[in-house]
């Protein structure tokens, strides 16, 4: 599994930060929630989920945060269909963020299942979430930090010495 390099992660963080600062995007609605998938690979029928976007409305009175984190634990809804929350370390503190997957009317049942399967314990993600006074932290967007669609092999250097 190939993890994107620091340059790619930094570019993603800059892009997310610029979206957060742009007033045109500051009132995004959870009605526009999206499960973003890769194109199906040759010979495979299933596309892989690479991002969850606009899972909650960005509220002006809340603080926005973007972080790279490894998922430590997850909690499912009573039905077991949707993933309700994720737990990760943020500023050396265990943080629980609500995913909003099951509560989102914009998602179909298949998208809810795919979104819930996308988030896995032990994997790292780039996450945008918000903290609002008096409520639990809420997920806005989440991006995978590896490329599930490519199997990249390391190039081996052949070193020859002249005597």
Image (tube, rainbow, N blue to C red):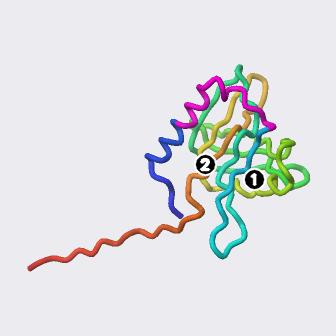
In the visual, does 9 lie left or right of 106? Answer: left
Image coords of residue 147 (percent x, y): 56, 59
Discs 2/1, front? 1
- Identity of the residue furthest to the right in this view: 79
Which of disc 1 and disc 2 is earlier in sequence?
A: 1
Residue at 64 percent of width and 54 percent of height: 50
Give the residue number, with chain letter if any, for mark 2. 125
- The quadrant in which residue 141 appears is top right
In the visual, does 54 lie left or right of 91? Answer: right
Give the residue number, with chain letter if any, for mark 1. 115
Residue at 76 percent of width and 44 percent of height: 85
Image coords of residue 8 (percent x, y): 48, 47
Instruction: Rate crowding at label 2 as few (under 14), some (14 to 19) or many (20 or more) other CA atoms within 10 Å.
Output: many
Image coords of residue 7 (percent x, y): 43, 46
Quadrant for the C terminus, please: bottom left
Residue 68's disc is: none
- The quadrant in which residue 114 appears is bottom right
Q: Nearer the viewer, residue 54 or 118?
A: 54
Task: Assess whether residue 25 is covered by the magenta stretch.
Answer: yes
Q: Give the magenta range.
A: 15-31
Quadrant for the N terminus, please: bottom right
Instruction: Rate crowding at label 1 as few (under 14), some (14 to 19) or many (20 or more) other CA atoms within 10 Å.
Output: many
Task: Assess whether residue 10 is covered by the magenta stretch.
Answer: no
- Identity of the residue furthest to the bottom in this view: 163
Mark 2 in CB contact with mark 1 (< 8 angstroms): no
Q: Nearer the viewer, residue 68 or 25?
A: 25
The secondary element bearing badge 1 is classed as: helix
For the residues marked 2 and 1, what is the alpha-carbon distance in whole angstroms?
A: 13 Å
């Amino acid at each position: 599994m190939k993890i994107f390099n620091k340059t790619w992660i930094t570019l993603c963080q800059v892009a997310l930060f610029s979206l957060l600062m742009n007033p045109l995007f500051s009132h995004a609605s959870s009605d526009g929630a999206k499960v973003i998938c890769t194109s199906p690979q040759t010979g495979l029928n299933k596309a892989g989920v690479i991002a969850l976007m606009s899972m909650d409305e960005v509220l002006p009175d809340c603080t926005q945060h973007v972080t790279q984190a490894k998922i430590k634990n997850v909690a499912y809804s009573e039905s077991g269909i949707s993933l309700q929350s994720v737990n990760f370390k943020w500023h050396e503190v265990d943080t629980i963020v609500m995913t909003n997957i099951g509560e989102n009317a914009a998602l179909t049942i298949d998208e809810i299942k795919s979104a819930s399967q996308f988030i896995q314990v032990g994997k790292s993600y780039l996450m945008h979430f918000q903290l609002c006074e008096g409520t639990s932290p809420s997920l806005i967007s989440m991006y995978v930090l590896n490329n599930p669609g490519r199997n990249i092999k390391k190039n081996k250097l052949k070193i020859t010495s002249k005597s």
